[in-house]
Image (cartoon, rainbow, N blue to C red):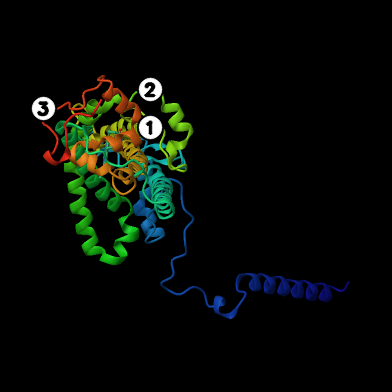
Amino acid sequence: MQGWMRRLIIVLLGLGLAGAAHAQQAPNADAAKGPPANFAAPAEPKPNESNADRARTQPGNNAPFWRAVRRSGNEQGFTTLPGPEQGTLIQRFLQYPGSRYTTAGEAWREVRNRWLVPYGGSLILIVLGALALYYWRRGPLGGHEADTGRKIERFTPFERSAHWANAIAFVTLAVSGLVMAFGKFFLLPILGSALFGWLTYALKTLHNLVGPLFAVSLVIVIFTFVRDEFPRKGDWAWLRSGGGVFSGREPPSHRFNAGEKIIFWAGVVVLGLAAVGSGLVLDKVLPGLEYLRADMQLAHLIHATAAVLMMALLVIHIYLGTIGMKGAYQVMRTGYSDEGWAREHHDLWLQDIKAGRIPAQRSGKSPEPAAGPARAQT
Ligand code: HEM
């Protein structure tokens, strides 16, 4: 090849490569002009970059700060705040049943918002719906035995005082607790945030004050009624026939029937004491505890679970004690039941009274004058 020809090829190839290289660097005309004067090219994040460095390289990005905060869940830092958890901004990782493995606060939030609120609320609504349906289709239980005019003392003044103190405290706690847990769904849209905020704050304060009153009255109620709440002959037959709620005739029982006993042991004793114990932790009135965040979260989960289950059971008790069973409310209000009512609902108890094994009048006070003789006829 001629020398001039070889040089021409080299020049052309050189121009072609330069053009290709230029095309790679500047694919369009704007880009060819280069970045604007105020443009800061994003820097690659460097490992262990400080928040100040990151603020320079990526203004507004605080990732290193939050990474350090998150690390502090396992490491002690330093703050001037008082208290045993002063150096721990974010709690350690853990997993509650139903939550992800995440920081304790978030795990608590997940259990509350994903399980307790939706499923607890649904359970209470299902029980209320079932009772409403039953009442609508079948009406109140009882009323098959005519009144005889002969009265039996079913609850002494002491038993009634303990019961009603406990019932009033329970209803106060239930209403305030329901507003705190579910109010944002049904009250907030109606009341608006200012009124709802004040109402919830007031109810929360009331809840904290009434809690200890409920605790004391609950223990008194348990001791007052426990001796008649143990399983006895007739309970199994009562349960097998479902208490007669569908046949219309209640099987005989002693002073309390098997249904009352189940609600007593499950709802009043187990769930009641769990709600009270955890509630006293939340109220910070038990001595000797540190009340760390983890303690409070666990106490809250136990409290809310026990309270929701207790409400679901006690709603049945309250239904039967008011509109669900003829004559029941009068018995707890006055303390006296008619012999006819006793025969229909607690025939084994009535037989014990008639046989003289249980006195028909236990307190010193006699029944209302209009009610007839104080003692059941034997
Ligand atoms: C508005 C609320 C309530 C009403 C209307 C109500 C009504 C009644 C009535 C009418 C009785 C008598 C049943 C019978 O003669 O066999 C009774 C018994 C009883 N109540 Fe209540 N009650 C209420 C709340 C509570 C609460 C909150 C508790 C405890 C946490 C409770 C615990 C008991 C116990 C232990 C008995 C003894 C018989 C049994 O075990 O069912 N009550 N209640």
Distance, label 2 to label 3, CA atoms, is: 28 Å
Identify the residue at image location x=28%, y=43%: 327
Q: Which residue is mark 2?
A: 232
How many labels sit on residues?
3
The foreground one among 52 and 359 is 359
**Mark 2 against mark 1, which lies toward the viewer?**
2
Residue 364, numbered circle: 3
Residue 262, numbered circle: 1
Query: Label 1: how many residues lie within 10 Å, few (<14), some (14-19) or many (20+)?
Result: some
Counting from the top left corner in percent of width and height, residue 98 is at 46, 41
Counting from the top left corner in percent of width and height, residue 75 is at 35, 35
Report the amino acid beneath label 3.
Gly
Q: Which secondary structure, mark 3?
A: loop
Q: Quadrant of the C terminus?
A: top left
Residue 54 occupies which quadrant of the picture? bottom left
Query: Label 3: how many residues lie within 10 Å, few (<14), some (14-19) or many (20+)?
Result: few
Q: Is residue 12 left or right of residue 43?
A: right
Taking the view exactly as shown, the residue that stands out farthest to the right is 1
**Mark 3 against mark 1, which lies toward the viewer?**
3
Above-or-below relation of 20 to 374 = below
